[in-house]
Image: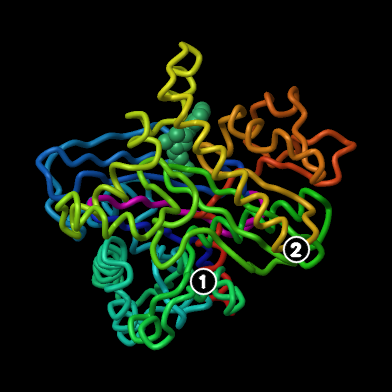
Amino acid sequence: MSATATRVLVLNSGSSSVKYQLLDMTDAESIGGSAAGRLAVGLVERIGEETSRLVHTPLAAGGEKRETEGPIADHEAALKAVAKELAADGLGLDSPELAAIGHRVVHGGLKFTEPTVIDEAVLTEIERLVPVAPLHNPANITGIRTARALRPDLPQVAVFDTAFHTTMPEYAARYAIDVATADAHRIRRYGFHGTSHAYVSRKTAALLGKAPEEVNVIVLHLGNGASASAVRGGRCVDTSMGLTPLEGLVMGTRSGDIDPAVTFHLKRVAGMDEDEVDTLLNKKSGLIGLCGDNDMREIRRRIDEGDERAQLAFDIYIHRLKKYIGAYSAVLGRVDAVAFTAGVGENAAPVREAAVAGLEEMGMAVDASLNALRSEEPRLISPDYARVAVAVVPTDEELEIAQQTYALVNA
Ligand code: AMP
């Protein structure tokens, strides 16, 4: 790597989309929460369709958003289109200033506990995990292979969604099923959204003026996907997502926790096959299954108009959230902070208010006027007297991936 190479390209490759950010890591601390250091951001969506779309915002070059529509056949074509957009602003992939490419990889199993420089052996191992992450790892692998073909000489780093959770004790990670069967099929709690839980728990400690080792935090990552984690002294000790991102909280389209016997019932009694059950629980459940909407803004609007289905969906969502706050308070013993993050957690004040309502005996409360303030910055929303800090801490998974990537290639 050249001494002047300070940029990291972060790629998040989904099945039909690629999200990307180019960051300059010269002063990484200044990047969080602001556009400083963030040179370009963008998204290619509907890859493989006639109506693919590339939205590119060159923040370093004035920030004028550019949109291109038209067929983009596959991930290779998508990355080439991204490279062309970056090159148009003098930020091309061939730039000597590019230090590395950081890839978000959803499932790292038990093997990958740290960000890892990618070689063929690492790719083979990520491929071996496809059976436990059939929806995510194949797209991540395609993104990696394509980027490696474009810049074979450049270090490429995999940052795993599961890595932060590999510190969970065995009694939290292991399901209470037959050990031989579980081990043969690698069935256990892995947890996801790890880069977000890592970033937010660290930022929450900083907000309290403490080192991560000194604080116990419950992180509530509430986006379209949602997960909770219990973080003791900077290390994850439990998390709500499991073998797959289906377990745990009520999400936009996923059921979260459910009696597994429901799946047998759907097969035996309702006559559904595995794929139909999978689609029902992952895509047609959660908020959208309960009330027809998965956007919390729309649900709140309907509640304000007196819509009872929307109200019930909201109440179920909050009830589950409260159960996890209670469970993780017991797991941690002492809670210093509860941190809300991601689309819903950062923006939906009524969710934060309702989730913490009635928890005064547990030292948790929300101040209505602090909760109503909107900001991009990490902030406390609990009253001074509350024993537990309740905070809103905007997540930044791209920055976390870039920082981990940059640290590794400079190590
Ligand atoms: P994420 O997956 O983190 O991007 O979060 C996306 C979700 O955040 C959306 O589906 C909405 O439910 C929610 N969201 C985004 N903005 C708002 C807002 N202003 N108020 C309430 N919910 C929001």
Where disc 1 sits, the SS reads helix
336 or 40: nearer the eye? 336
Sequence-wise first label, 1 or 2? 1
Residue 36 appears left or right of 268: right
Could you tell me which residue is drawn at 37 percent across and 47 percent down? 254
Q: In the current view of this chain or complex, which residue is farthest to the right?
A: 385
Could you tell me which residue is drawn at 26 percent across and 55 percent down? 265
**In which quadrant is the C terminus drawn?**
bottom right
User: In the figure, 398 relative to 382: above or below?
Assistant: below
Q: In the current view of this chain or complex, which residue is farthest to the front?
A: 269
User: In the figure, 233 relative to 74: above or below?
Assistant: below
User: Pointer 2: residues within 10 angstroms few (<14), some, or many (20+)?
Assistant: many
Q: Position of residue 33 (x, y in %)?
A: 61, 43
Residue at label 1? 163
How far apart marks 1 and 2 lie (CA) works out to 17 Å
229 or 70: nearer the eye? 229
Residue at label 2? 212
Residue 373 appears left or right of 153: right
Q: Is residue 18 magenta?
A: yes
Q: Amino acid at mark 1?
A: Ala
Colouring chosen for the image of the structure: rainbow
Q: Amino acid at mark 2?
A: Pro
User: In the figure, 373 relative to 218: above or below?
Assistant: above
